[in-house]
Image (cartoon, rainbow, N blue to C red):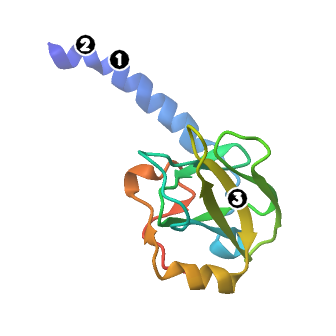
Amino acid sequence: MRIAKQLPALAFVLMICGLCYGQETAPTPLLSQQNQATIYVYRNFYHVTFGKEAPDISVNGEKLAVLDEGRYFVASVTPGFLIVTSGKKKDNRVEIDARPGETYYLRVRAHPGKLFARFELFRVSKEEAKQDAEKLQYVKPNDIKSSRVIKDAPKP
């Protein structure tokens, strides 16, 4: 009795699946790592901030991760004009003309204020990033906000 009531719904679902399966679709090109640009973003121990004072790092409005002190993350981004922001201030940003296969390094620095810390975001060289990377740990899994962020990435 119960199955008889569900048969019309099942037949409808199978019919829709059959129609979708019969349509030809153009294959979507997979974005390989070579077609993407890579950004390393890190925050070293410059100034201690009180509590969970950690900026959101976004690229073109998409939130990638929350960055605590002594942490870093690696993200794969679509090449082109990128605006990387740190925190809520709109003037705290770095503009990058990202190219496929290229890697870019960004550092976040905290400057303590009267009530809240102010975060500064700037581009650094690969050598500077390597020098700072010895003391850093990868971002915590619950601080990752986008699938663009590579999980368990190696240090720069």
Q: Is residue 86 above or below residue 107?
A: above
Q: Residue at x 25, y 13 (%)?
A: 5
Q: Is residue 48 above or below residue 4?
A: below
Give amino acid for label 1: Pro
| Residue placed under numbered mark 1 in the picture | 8
Q: Residues within 10 Å of mark 1 (few under 14, many from 20)?
A: few
Q: Earlier in the sequence, mark 3 or mark 1?
A: 1
Q: Work out how far the residue at label 2 is from the one at label 3, CA to CA, in angstroms.
A: 61 Å
Q: Earlier in the sequence, mark 2 or mark 3?
A: 2
Q: In this rendering, would 145 be left or right of 102? A: left
Give amino acid for label 2: Lys
Q: Nearer the viewer, residue 65 or 81?
A: 65
Q: Nearer the viewer, residue 76 or 127?
A: 127
Q: In this rendering, would 19 be left or right of 120? A: left
Residue found at the very far front of the displayed protein: 114
Q: Position of residue 48 (x, y in %)?
A: 48, 57
- Label annotation for residue 5: 2
| Numbered disc 3: secondary structure | strand
Q: Residue at x 69, y 56 (%)?
A: 120
Give amino acid for label 3: Leu
- Label annotation for residue 121: 3
Q: Position of residue 82 (x, y in %)?
A: 79, 56
Q: Position of residue 15 (x, y in %)?
A: 47, 29
Q: How many numbered discs sit on the rendered protein? A: 3
Q: Residue at x 44, y 51 (%)?
A: 143
Q: Is residue 101 above or below residue 8?
A: below
Q: Nearer the viewer, mark 2 or mark 3?
A: 3
Mark 2 touching mark 3, by CB under 8 A? no
Q: Nearer the viewer, mark 3 or mark 1?
A: 3
| Numbered disc 2: secondary structure | helix
